[in-house]
Image (cartoon, rainbow, N blue to C red):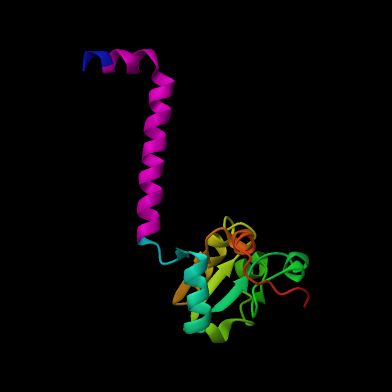
Amino acid sequence: MQDIMEFAHNHLVLCLAWVVLFVLVIVTTFKGLFSKVKTISRGEATHLINKANAVVVDVRSRDDFRRGHISGAVNLATAEVKKGNLTEIEKFKDQPVIVVCATGQSAGEAAAQLSAAGFTQVSVLKEGISGWNGENLPLVRGK
């Protein structure tokens, strides 16, 4: 035990960094477990789209959306979600909604705002369109 205390004293910054990272991992884990918005895999997304009539909300830019999007997706920019301009998807409040971005990193904020706006079943696609495309799942071009 004395060796551990000596190590911690000699390497204070390293030990503090380890403690901070450990706390962040725990906080992130619990936040994900108790969040209303779930992160789903491509298989789960495909199942929701095909069996539960899920609506895909693509929050990327219009140009990125035109380059390739999931079939039937609705393009609604993150800025529009932040402003509360949800008239285009208002009718889907009780259906499963899958929020998609380029890599799965920025969709969480839009999904949380949709959940706060009363959407009951909101999910985020893990790894976004890049993961979808990486598994050679179909994308629709244009529109």
What is the chief secondary structure element of the magenta stretch?
Answer: helix
In the depicted structure, whether residue 57 falls above or below residue 88: above
Q: Residue furthest bottom?
A: 91
Q: Nearer the viewer, residue 115 or 39?
A: 39
Q: Classify residue 25 as left or right of residue 81.
A: left
In the depicted structure, whether residue 138 falls above or below residue 3: below
Residue 140 magenta-drawn?
Answer: no
- Counting the numbered discs, the total is 0
Quadrant into which the N terminus falls: top left
Quadrant into which the C terminus falls: bottom right
Residue in the image at 40% along x and 57% along y: 32
Q: Quadrant of residue 74?
A: bottom right
Q: Nearer the viewer, residue 140 or 29?
A: 140
Could you say where residue 131 lies in the image, as x and y percent from the top left?
A: 59, 59
Q: Which residues are magenta?
A: 4-33
Q: Nearer the viewer, residue 83 or 60?
A: 60
Q: Classify residue 61 as left or right of residue 33.
A: right
Does residue 131 appear in this view? Answer: yes
Does residue 93 appear in this view? Answer: no
Q: Classify residue 78 as left or right of residue 114.
A: right
Residue 18 magenta-drawn?
Answer: yes
Residue in the image at 38% along x and 24% along y: 15
In the depicted structure, whether residue 3 falls above or below residue 104: above
Q: Residue furthest front?
A: 136
Could you say where residue 125 lies in the image, as x and y percent from the top left?
A: 53, 65
Could you say where residue 129 lies in the image, as x and y percent from the top left?
A: 63, 63
Could you say where residue 49 lies in the image, as x and y percent from the top left?
A: 53, 79
Residue in the image at 35% along x and 45% along y: 26
